[in-house]
Image (tube, rainbow, N blue to C red):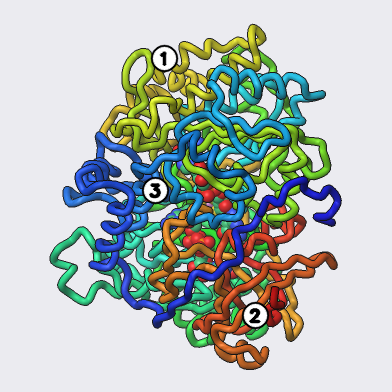
Amino acid sequence: MSTQSRPSKKKIEAQPPANFTGLKLSPPKEMAAGIPAILSAAKHILEEMDPFRGLSVLTKLNQQQGFDCPGCAWPDPQKRSKLGEYCENGAKAVAEEATIRRVTSDFFKKYSITNLSQQSDYWLGKQGRLTEPMLLREGSEHYEPVTWEKAFQWIARHLNSLNSPDEAVFYTSGRTSNEAAFLYQLFVRQFGTNNLPDCSNMCHESSGSGLSQTLGIGKGSVTLEDFYKAEVIMIMGQNPGTNHPRMLTALQKAKKNGCKVIIVNPLPEAGFQYFKHPQDPVQMLGKGTLLTDIFLQIKINGDVALLKAMNKILLEKEAQSPGSVLDKEFIEQHTEGFEAFTNDLKQYDLDELIRETGIEKAKILQACELLASKKRIIICWAMGLTQHKNAVGNVREIVNLLLMKGSIGKPGAGTCPVRGHSNVQGDRTMGIWEKPSQAFLERLGRNFNFIPPEHHGFDSVEAIKAMYNGSAKVFFAMGGNFLSATPDTEYTAQALQNCKLTVHVSTKLNRSHLVHGNEALILPCLGRTEEDMQKSGPQFVSVENSMGIVHKTQGRLEPASTQLLSEPAIVARLAKATLGYQTSVNWDEMTHNYDAIRDAIEAVIPGFEHYNQKVRQENGFYLPNCARDRKFNTLNGKAQFTINSCSSIRLLADEYLMMTIRSHDQYNTTIYGLNDRYRGIYNERRVILMHPEDIKSAQLSPEQIVDLYSYYDNEERIARKFIVVPYPIPKQCVATYFPEANVLVPVNSTAEISNTPTSKSVVIKIKTALTD
Ligand SMILES: Nc1nc2c(c(=O)[nH]1)N[C@H]1C(S)=C(S)[C@@H](COP(=O)(O)OP(=O)(O)OC[C@H]3O[C@@H](n4cnc5c(=O)[nH]c(N)nc54)[C@H](O)[C@@H]3O)O[C@H]1N2
Ligand SMILES: Nc1nc2c(c(=O)[nH]1)N[C@H]1C(S)=C(S)[C@@H](COP(=O)(O)OP(=O)(O)OC[C@H]3O[C@@H](n4cnc5c(=O)[nH]c(N)nc54)[C@H](O)[C@@H]3O)O[C@H]1N2
Ligand SMILES: [Mo]
């Protein structure tokens, strides 16, 4: 693929600038949260607002009458702490949104698109909240203000002049509420396409694919209560200390109840070592709780090999002492494929599997000892498992282990894919999906008296390719930062630049606003923290957390500008402008009072009976979950054992396997700050973490500047200027931060079945940096 095919007219930078900010290093931390977390939260809040506003926001965060944290999707406990039910990174997420800084039309007058694209992502985000709709005309260097009415007419004109509705792409990020998401997909399907890619395509799609095939539901099966009853919790490919800090509180409680914790990760993440609950004054004095019992430091993408080895050892133990390890009754009654699964495992050599993991055999045996003797096991996972070629295999192999132990659909046991964006799971439930089921489309069509399109739409990677090759021409994003979150930055930039129109509904400025189609629009919207006033009065919306609880969230702050519209209002007005009289939906009624949207959701989506009543209950309500009830919604009603392949990646001596991960100071592409405190990396993001012996044998030195190359499919991709940082990571494995390294993730390298970009296993070479 060539990024030269259509030279850009302007010098717009698709990648963040390769400037250094001044690296400082210290040893990685062994304690998470505690006083440093409180200080960090306070610092980020005070940088964005005065103490009074800060306190007023934090006291409403995750409280019954307040708003849901726009950070992660970890559930709230039934009994909320009076001292505050949020974490350091939740406070940062809120500071970012509730900031008092503003981006006005004067700002866009002052800075051209080219100027802005040369700034860092950190700088862009720090400019403050977007305040008015802005239009970029063809050939112009500056966004200019536009009225909402004109903006909707502009988009409608483009959409209605396409040859087919399938030439438009409608992306969603995962902060969009259930109400906005439902209206959005309804508009898109009335317009006539299923082109509804979302951030999930790059996130937990592999979990959805693996779980629905084996257990009949694409979501996890456990509740927070299960954490407190589990005997073993195994956490794979996840860094909760940074990305789901409140999960540490749940782990601490589990440990108090006697649970053992196994960690599978290439990095010794601080969050798994000593933890002090920042909202518990007594704990602040002590040493903290040691959360990890067994740490398995795995090589990147060694997880299928590890799980196969574990499953093999468990089978051997069962053979030695029949009836002591497996749940035979469960396997017989509820599963299919056990024999084929065990036969397949026989052909693997245990030591060979263990070699692939890079872990000492004794440690794996120790973990299996624990798994063999216990009956209530939870396995949690996140991006370390879902962003590989065999990512769906990772998830299915987890299911194999749990099925052998009968550890599903009973208290203290089950699957726990820990979701990312705070409503990414809810958006899917609402129909944000390029591959909707027939049953869903039928109900939607019946309820709104139209015929929804049946053929499947583009996922995120397919959408990029369609825009690149010209078969998609309009790109509309409900939130997110598509350019920086997707793979192959330069290729994706070209794809977006090939569009006739790119539109972003956003709260903050980001790089996707700068790498645009012929024309572009920014539509500023209300955030979670703000009051949403409609004709019938103030509205609340609802979200679904990682454990399938739907609950309300209501912002109380005065909106960042009088010109902001809510996401549902934007969808409704765009739908009216685009569909005109050809719509069977009363869009005004839907937005005057969001109860009307919830009534429609109730009519279309199972599990939402009495939605308006149940969502007003304290703590919300659980959606039905068949796996939780041991009812497997598969073709034959049985949970499926599966056969999965180990990693096929074989590295040459000068190649490394790179994972692109999050620092402690970022939310996906939003950069809160320049520190990765737990890993001891300060004031710099352009770093590459390497094993000290790898540094030596590659004849590099610590803190040397290198360029990174990927040669996937014989095409060269380059990420310039990264500083080598010695780190306790397995040999031939390296780590960089997302999104700086996304330029190296090939758009064609995706997971089997789920099509998720392989952001955690990019084969690279490292060379001394070329001087400018
Ligand atoms: N503060 C904050 N919170 C967030 C986010 C954020 O950016 N900032 N993002 C949100 C979103 S959308 C998501 S999806 C989640 C992401 O949450 P995580 O999945 O925790 O995020 P990553 O930083 O991608 O971390 C991946 C972890 O997997 C490990 N890993 C990488 N490759 C492998 C592998 O091959 N095997 C194993 N076993 N482990 C591996 C890495 O060492 C790292 O610890 O967090 C959500 N919450
Ligand atoms: N290399 C690599 N790439 C990755 C990953 C990785 O681990 N490695 N992780 C992937 C994952 S897990 C995910 S989920 C995606 C994330 O992909 P996205 O969801 O597309 O990206 P975000 O950075 O979360 O989006 C941030 C932007 O959302 C907008 N925003 C914030 N709040 C709101 C709101 O309430 N409403 C609206 N309309 N807009 C809002 C702001 O303008 C902000 O700039 O990235 C993926 N990309
Ligand atoms: Mo995510």
3 vs 2, front mark = 3
Q: Is residue 270 left or right of residue 454?
A: left
Q: Tell me the quarter of the picture where residue 168 sits.
A: top right
Q: Which circle marks residue 96 in the picture?
A: 3
**Label 1: how many Cα within 10 Å (few below 14, some 14–19, many 20+):** some
Residue ID for mark 2: 356
Q: Residue at x 47, y 56 (%)?
A: 671
Name the residue beneath numbered marker 1: 592
Q: Return the x and y of residue 473 as percentages of the image width and height.
A: 76, 33
The amino acid pointed to by label 2 is: Glu
Q: Is residue 323 above or below residue 468?
A: below
| Quarter of the figure that contains the N terminus | bottom right
Which x, y percent locates residue 274? 30, 74
654 sits to left or right of 564: right
- Residue 162: where, in percent of width, then height? 78, 24
Is residue 480 shown to the viewer in this render? yes
Compare residues 591 and 24 and report the one nearer the observer.
Answer: 24
Q: Residue at x 18, y 68 (%)?
A: 284
Residue 674 vs 635, above or below: the answer is below
- Distance in Å between CA atoms under marks 3 and 2: 42 Å
